[in-house]
Image (cartoon, rainbow, N blue to C red):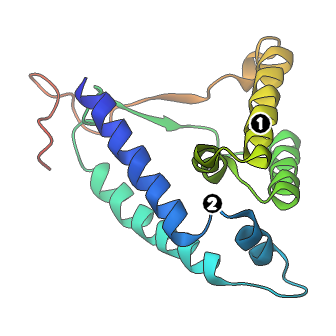
């Protein structure tokens, strides 16, 4: 139950950050993506700040013996760049540019009940369902490529209490 409350708190903090930074407003996102006319570079600072925090905390967290709510860290093992990755990234970018939403801000925006956000999230969910039924079920190489990565010797007792 503790992990559910932690996830809820992290999601709430993430959503508040998206709203505070303006990333939940499609007009602001589109202004950031439109470098030819009225470019708004402010979201670049939001992304740079998020990347900086991630770079520091990722290294700190991986020094732990185990995650707070699991026995091992689950990290991706694939590092190759293939056509499916590039095509998926391009499709994601086109959807972001046309809709003005990416998945996180879209989920935050459905709280306002706006039709564009609801349509975006519904079509995003339909695309995820379609992908899982067309590709993942037929091609085992598209399944989750993460593996359990014990970064340290497993703890002798129960998982860490949370202290670094």
**First in sequence: mark 1 or mark 2?**
2
Quarter of the N terminus within the rendering: top left
Query: Pointer 1: what residue?
Result: 124
Element under disc 1: helix
Q: Kindly identify which residue carries mark 2.
A: 24
Q: Position of residue 94 (x, y in %)?
A: 88, 55
- Which quadrant would residue 118 be assigned to in this image? top right
**Left-right relation of 2 to 38:** left
Q: Taking 118 as reference, is 104 above or below it?
A: below
Q: Is residue 81 visible?
A: no
> Residue 104, percent across and down?
60, 49
Circle 2 Cα neighbour tier, 10 Å, few/some/many (<14 / 14–19 / ≥20): many
Instruction: Tell which of 120 and 82 is nearer to you.
Output: 120
Q: CA distance from mark 1 to mark 2?
A: 16 Å
Up/down of 57 relative to 131, above or below: below
Q: Nearer the viewer, mark 1 or mark 2?
A: 2
- Position of residue 159 measured from the top left corner of the image (x, y, whole percent): 17, 27
In the picture, measured across the screen, residue 92 lies left or right of residue 16, that is right
54 vs 145: above or below: below
> Does residue 5 appear left or right of residue 109 in this picture?
left
């Amino acid at each position: 139950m503790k992990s559910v409350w932690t996830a809820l708190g992290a999601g709430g903090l993430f959503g508040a950050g998206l709203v505070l930074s303006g990333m939940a407003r499609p007009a602001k996102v589109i202004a950031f993506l439109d470098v030819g006319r009225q470019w708004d570079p402010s979201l670049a600072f939001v992304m740079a700040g998020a990347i900086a925090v991630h770079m520091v905390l990722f290294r700190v967290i991986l020094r732990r013996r185990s995650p707070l709510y699991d026995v091992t860290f689950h990290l991706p093992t694939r590092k190759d760049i293939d056509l499916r990755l590039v095509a998926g990234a391009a499709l994601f970018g086109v959807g972001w540019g046309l809709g003005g939403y990416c998945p996180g801000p879209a989920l935050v925006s459905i709280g306002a009940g706006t039709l564009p956000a609801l349509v975006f999230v519904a079509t995003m969910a339909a695309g995820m369902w379609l992908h899982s039924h067309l590709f993942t079920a037929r091609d085992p190489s598209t399944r989750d490529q993460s593996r359990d990565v014990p970064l340290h010797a497993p703890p002798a007792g129960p998982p860490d209490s949370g202290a670094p």
